[in-house]
Amino acid sequence: MFFLLFGTHYAYLGKWGWQFLFWITLGGLGIWDFIDIFTIPSKVNGHNAKIFMQIEEIEKRERNDEQARQMAMISAVKGN
């Protein structure tokens, strides 16, 4: 409830404009709080899924780089 009260859930989602609007209107005088009870879980899940995909892409790139280094080392050893 702390996050809904202060609107920090919008900051977590990177929506600073919404957060400031939330603060200025005091959460739409409670209307946003009521709506957010039902919508925030799906918004956070979507945001976390994007982060997960970015992490997966970074890990894939690192695996490919490591494999390329190993292949280069094997080629260097065979070349001698």
Image (spheres, rainbow, N blue to C red):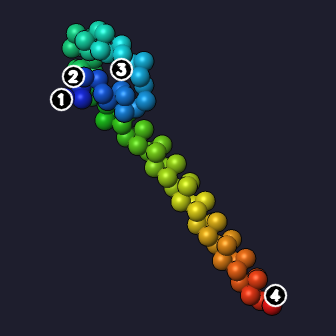
Q: Which mark is residue 19?
A: 3
Q: What is the three-letter code of the residue carrying label 1?
A: Met
Left or right, 57 with respect to 23, comes to right
Residue 40 in the image, given as x and y percentages of width and height:
31, 31
| N-term-proximal mark, 3 vs 4 | 3
Residue 42 in the image, given as x and y percentages of width and height:
35, 35
Q: Which mark is residue 30?
A: none
Residue 43 in the image, given as x and y percentages of width and height:
38, 33
Q: For the point 26% across and 15% down, which residue is it?
A: 27
Q: Residues within 10 Å of mark 3 (few under 14, many from 20)?
A: many
Badge 4 marks a residue whose secondary structure is helix
Residue assigned mark 2: 5
| N-term-proximal mark, 1 vs 4 | 1
Front residue (pair 50, 21): 21
Badge 2 marks a residue whose secondary structure is helix
11 w.r.t. 28: above or below: below
Q: What is the three-letter code of the residue carrying label 4?
A: Gly
18 w.r.t. 8: above or below: above
54 w.r.t. 32: above or below: below
| N-term-proximal mark, 2 vs 4 | 2
